[in-house]
Amino acid sequence: MITSEEIQEHNIAHNVTHKRAFTHIAHQLADKGILVEEIIKSLNNFQVAIPSWALGTGGTRFGRFPGGGEPRSLEEKIADVGLLHQLNASSGAISLHIPWDIPDNANAIKALAAQYNLKFDAVNSNTFQDQPDAEHSYKFGSLCHVDKAVRNQAIAHNKEVIDYGVELGSKSLTVWLADGSTFPGQHNFREALMRTQDSLAQIYSHLPDDWTMLVEYKPYEPNFYSMVIPDWGTSHLLASSLGEKALSLVDLGHHLPNTNIEQIVAILMMQNKLGGFHFNDSKYGDDDLTVGSLKPYQLFLIFNELVDGMKNTKNPELSWMIDASHNLKDPLEDLLQSVDAIKIAYAQALTIDRAALKEAQENCDVAAAQSILQDAFRTDVRSIVAESRAQNGGALDPIGAYRHVNVRKRLIQERGEVTVSTGL
Amino acid sequence: MITSEEIQEHNIAHNVTHKRAFTHIAHQLADKGILVEEIIKSLNNFQVAIPSWALGTGGTRFGRFPGGGEPRSLEEKIADVGLLHQLNASSGAISLHIPWDIPDNANAIKALAAQYNLKFDAVNSNTFQDQPDAEHSYKFGSLCHVDKAVRNQAIAHNKEVIDYGVELGSKSLTVWLADGSTFPGQHNFREALMRTQDSLAQIYSHLPDDWTMLVEYKPYEPNFYSMVIPDWGTSHLLASSLGEKALSLVDLGHHLPNTNIEQIVAILMMQNKLGGFHFNDSKYGDDDLTVGSLKPYQLFLIFNELVDGMKNTKNPELSWMIDASHNLKDPLEDLLQSVDAIKIAYAQALTIDRAALKEAQENCDVAAAQSILQDAFRTDVRSIVAESRAQNGGALDPIGAYRHVNVRKRLIQERGEVTVSTGL
Amino acid sequence: MITSEEIQEHNIAHNVTHKRAFTHIAHQLADKGILVEEIIKSLNNFQVAIPSWALGTGGTRFGRFPGGGEPRSLEEKIADVGLLHQLNASSGAISLHIPWDIPDNANAIKALAAQYNLKFDAVNSNTFQDQPDAEHSYKFGSLCHVDKAVRNQAIAHNKEVIDYGVELGSKSLTVWLADGSTFPGQHNFREALMRTQDSLAQIYSHLPDDWTMLVEYKPYEPNFYSMVIPDWGTSHLLASSLGEKALSLVDLGHHLPNTNIEQIVAILMMQNKLGGFHFNDSKYGDDDLTVGSLKPYQLFLIFNELVDGMKNTKNPELSWMIDASHNLKDPLEDLLQSVDAIKIAYAQALTIDRAALKEAQENCDVAAAQSILQDAFRTDVRSIVAESRAQNGGALDPIGAYRHVNVRKRLIQERGEVTVSTGL
Amino acid sequence: MITSEEIQEHNIAHNVTHKRAFTHIAHQLADKGILVEEIIKSLNNFQVAIPSWALGTGGTRFGRFPGGGEPRSLEEKIADVGLLHQLNASSGAISLHIPWDIPDNANAIKALAAQYNLKFDAVNSNTFQDQPDAEHSYKFGSLCHVDKAVRNQAIAHNKEVIDYGVELGSKSLTVWLADGSTFPGQHNFREALMRTQDSLAQIYSHLPDDWTMLVEYKPYEPNFYSMVIPDWGTSHLLASSLGEKALSLVDLGHHLPNTNIEQIVAILMMQNKLGGFHFNDSKYGDDDLTVGSLKPYQLFLIFNELVDGMKNTKNPELSWMIDASHNLKDPLEDLLQSVDAIKIAYAQALTIDRAALKEAQENCDVAAAQSILQDAFRTDVRSIVAESRAQNGGALDPIGAYRHVNVRKRLIQERGEVTVSTGL
């Protein structure tokens, strides 16, 4: 949908401005004793997976306003992620959702992904919707259900998802449970959690040795009184009981108002039990907005913990993924904005003067500690992120390039104006 | 679906227990100087409208798990409300939603409703979804839209809704706007609000003299950064600018965490500007749960204000409606629970010793003031509500009667297992 | 301050009304197959400790408006709790706070308490304020402090508190930490938590064999960015690492908005790790209001879990305490209201038809499950609680009796109008 | 405490780095068609008042950990604000609090302030604490009190505050009311609000023609069930009823969780009814933290509205003030950080490409609108703010200079280690 030449051409047009900004920031960081090349190296190694369901227009319970040119098949979803990766050089993985993305021919799909330099990140199971051919309904839960037959169906589904993942080269299973209760009395909390623990143990036993199981938590929605795994504490309880391969997954939108998420990140890493991230942003609940669009400082503080934890703990390597819903924006533009925001936060966190921060902390110098973090946050690192992209063949200004050649128009021409929402 | 005889039979089976409880509460209230007959009189006059969209199974953006026997037409919706009214003697009105409930023949529909002793409450417009034949999309707003053509379409739709309402004998239009923005920068707040004000003024000008316009507010969802009418203050600003016939409508789920809703009720009534209620309950956001299922004391405190305000202000008569979503329960059972909870709260509020409360307030006797309210709340008034129902031909135990004759099974036999969700 | 005769006299005046209500509820419960005597037996065994600091007027950072007749010494505090116990027969324990309540002569204090039939519940340490003679300040933390000398001072203080408790016959230490950070960067979360864990381990090693350590959590205040033990998950992590004698303590006001506290209770009991409760109520944060004054249904749902968990888990016996602040009400009246609310919720939870609830849960009959809980909640059990009090020499109407003989006036006559706030 | 020479010397040491950064940003803005001089001009005219109570260490209800060298008198408070103004060239006003800051000799105080180039901003009344000599207590309210004598005392106090302000050259009165209720039933909401309205009208009648009355709102604390003026809607209701000179005041910490404050700013300015700001930051409630320390993007979005509103509405000139509590940091450093954060947000808001934003809004180009705001926010404008300071005799790096010459040590030498908390 866009050629390398078009990207390079676009880059050339932006090069003078870019170089000036990049030279300035390199100089500025050098004064602080930081080599900009080191930051670029870290950015080059950073890949954020794109979930297959994020490539179309999302909606709310009140309605959905689709756009044109959305992908109609797994192949087209892979093509879309490939396009993102071409533009930003950081979207080199796709996260599939079963049953929405069952590959007919795993080898062909693997080959296609390889063409785009894409890997298969975590696979995701779905027990929050009923499938047309399903024997049992998940209306009242899946892994926690009072009825063993329903639980068994959900366990078998998760095992099947692992099998699909093995074929494609994935290395982890993400379990997000919609299970919960909507009214007091509906659940016996204790028993529901014990059943869930038992079901997860059965799925865990099916996990290959080099896989991880990522246990997500969420306080509410779609159930509105309780969720079986409402918070990091419950997720951690389950992951600890399951074994070393089970880890907690943090979705930024899955917290009660005012939660200090960065502290949760730190505590989980202290236990070597943080498995991965679902990035998005929110103001009210699980709003699933563009990463960094509402609370960029929180995002930076989270990366501050991640950078520190990755260096100073034995936490396993993390799985990074976007998990947002694009109700109003072109999904591809939205994803480009999200990945960009993540990399900016990461780059800023890499410019923190950690020795000075440590010293301030040891002196209880609160004002200095705050200033050190804010100095990094207020530093304009965008040209470093751009430089990293360009060095890897991407665009200095991904959305600019995307709009310049009018990719969406090309997609509509190929796929049509009216598209079918895949999945949700 | 249920005969009067079946109801009476069921009542007879419960009569001894009922009479004992009723005699006790009558005695208990008499000690406080309250005549139970006065409370029954108030309850007899109390009708809560049922919205046409609440008769089917609701869902979330993650999915929907439909039940059987749901109404397939406006006629069947009216029949369902009629059934509720038969059982609880308090659901004598239906609130229609356009375009989901456009009557083909208004006179026939009016006649049908009259058979069930039903009136037509407020009519509701819909500018939060696109209709198949619509020229313009509401993706980016309706009454607030930057494009005048979109606004005009939305204004025309609202006027049309008024016209339908006039035909059926409704006396008010409820305007709920999904309009808002999902990202900073999307809206110029001021201009969006001014456009909305202007659009509402045009709709207002189409309002018959004996009608009211109810302006709803909501802080978020489906937009996740701002809503054009986010709070009672903005609703009141608009209603004041529009004129006497415009009033604010309070939906219990449309508030930020920890909001003191009962105080809002009091302030609006002090201005004679409270128009009506959408009853439901919630723990997190606009959860649309059964009334009284999570915060029964809040519901009681709201009725405390309503009873006080209806007596001591010149606020116009209120429009009462349920607005809940039934994702897991049988919608009809859910509605019976909701109406019951509302009447219990109302009855409790009627047993408050207002002279003593006034005295405690004037003496700054906080402990006594609390005890007076809690005394009323802790009083078991259920048999009064049951007595009121029975006196009007309803069931002492509506859900019990409904289940006893297995109404749902009868509905499924008539309408089928697989039903089409109407509307949402 | 009040004689047994005065209480009995007051009871006689209320006896007719009481008996009528009690007879009715006994009848009502018998219909459900519940013996009212069983409930009374459970209530008789139920004692809620009164914290020594709750006997005076509390305040906020904006000011304090003291009342008259407040206790001026540990002896007078014990007398006040004795008075409460005399009236409600359920306040047979006092929880001391060190250094506010250091006994000069432990034996004399024990003897005094015995006269009032009082035991010594958990002792509480204080590392959130600096004491006049302290070498180190807790301005920047205590058990988590970066400076080992400060941590050692705080550890030694906690050990000393245990020693005081041993002398008085207490069996547990409650550790509430104000430790946290108020600005991003101030703390290294991981290291602060590891230091805290290490400090707690040292205190734990000082614990007698038959003691428990109760680890409290709180999300914010007095620190406003992070608390070292912000949530149940962190408290549980610490308690698990410390050993069997360490348990989590739930304070109802220490949660983020919308938290499902009853679920936390259930999860902790499932782990046999719930140690106790600090009862209060709140609308916004740690408001420390009268128990049951804002969210009585939540209190009932918590007792639903407690009753279930005490029966069906091996969770150790729980430590019950009020922890509220009385800024406006007479503290003794406020405490009477709180204990009453707790016992009402407990009694209601004891009337739940658990077999029917279990059946509803197993049938996914959500409407029935809700109705079963609400039936218990709507039942007026106040006369059962009164009967239990009266059977144990207490007052049918404790506040009524307290006011009737004007206890506060007597206290003021003895202690004076102007009193010194003890502690906070 | 610091000489001009010391500041200049410090500036010289930072000049090379500063100039490089300033040259870069000037270039960068020029590319966008923005003259950096225009921004500097706006910054030069921007003054934020310092409240007299913010110069000492604050505390919470749990305790207070004072620092040394705090001001002991009104004269020393003025000296402290003078010092801040010397360093940042933007703190040219002080906001007094009566009765904490009653001037013995108004003319002498005015002369002293003039020496430091300080004006007197809004004066603040206090009816949330009892004064030693007061006849009536505000325990149960002031302007809303049921007892007319209490109301009259509070009204007279507010009039007296105006009189003090007139003597000093202030032009507005800020009314913050702690009035509210802590338990349901304590207040009749309607009557409490009507009494408040009546009291305010009496105070308003005492207001000189060129004065404004700023009506603050707050949802909770120190009352924990309701506040008489809980939200902007109520504040606006009162201000509208009082007259043109009454305006609403927004304190950033006085909102429920997740409130969209920037929208409130826009709506009030649309009505020409925004009077001023109390700046601070918070994560949970009225945390009173350093401005910009938690939610810098929210601060920027608020300035986006302010810049837009000041240009496009007839809203009167705004009164800007910091209102924070310094529990852990050196108060003067904290205030320097706050003023700096405000000016950075203001400068960023001045770099928004408003023509492009308008165009994006008119095209419903949500992604572009977001990018335009974020582009301004991500721009590093710190050197512009520094340049503006330096041009006015202030320090390029105020805290650096303050620490370099060790001002705090000088203050302690003069005023002592142990200081008396003034006011709170």
Image (tube, coloured by chain):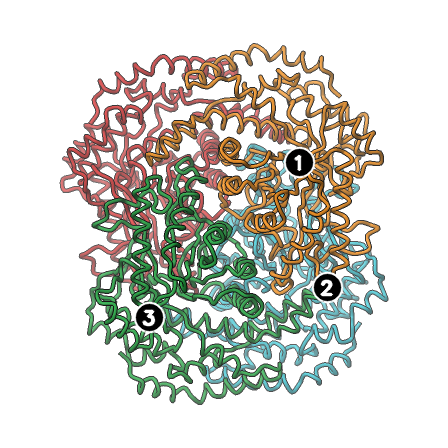
Chain colours: A green, B red, C orange, D cyan
Residue at image point 34% right, 53% down: B178
Q: In front: mark 3 or mark 1?
A: 3
Q: Which residue is under mark 1?
A: C328
Q: With D168 as the anchor, is D292 left or right in this view? A: left
Label 1 element class: loop
Question: Foreground: A391 or D238?
Answer: A391
Q: In front: mark 3 or mark 2?
A: 3
Q: Quadrant of the N terminus of chain B?
A: top left
Label 2: chain?
D
Image coordinates for residue B295, horizontal then vertical, percent: 46, 37
Q: Which residue is under mark 2?
A: D330
Quarter of the view holding residue A288: bottom left
Q: Which residue is under mark 3?
A: A332
Dot 3, how many residues are within 10 Å of its Cα: few (below 14), some (14-19), or many (20+)?
Answer: many
Looking at the rendered structure, the kind of residue marked 3 is Leu
Residue C248, above or below A284: above
Looking at the rendered structure, the kind of residue marked 2 is Asp
Image coordinates for residue D164, horizontal then vertical, percent: 73, 54
| Inter-mark Cα distance, 3 to 1 | 57 Å
Quarter of the view holding residue D97: bottom right
- Whether callout 3 and callout 1 share a subunit is answered no
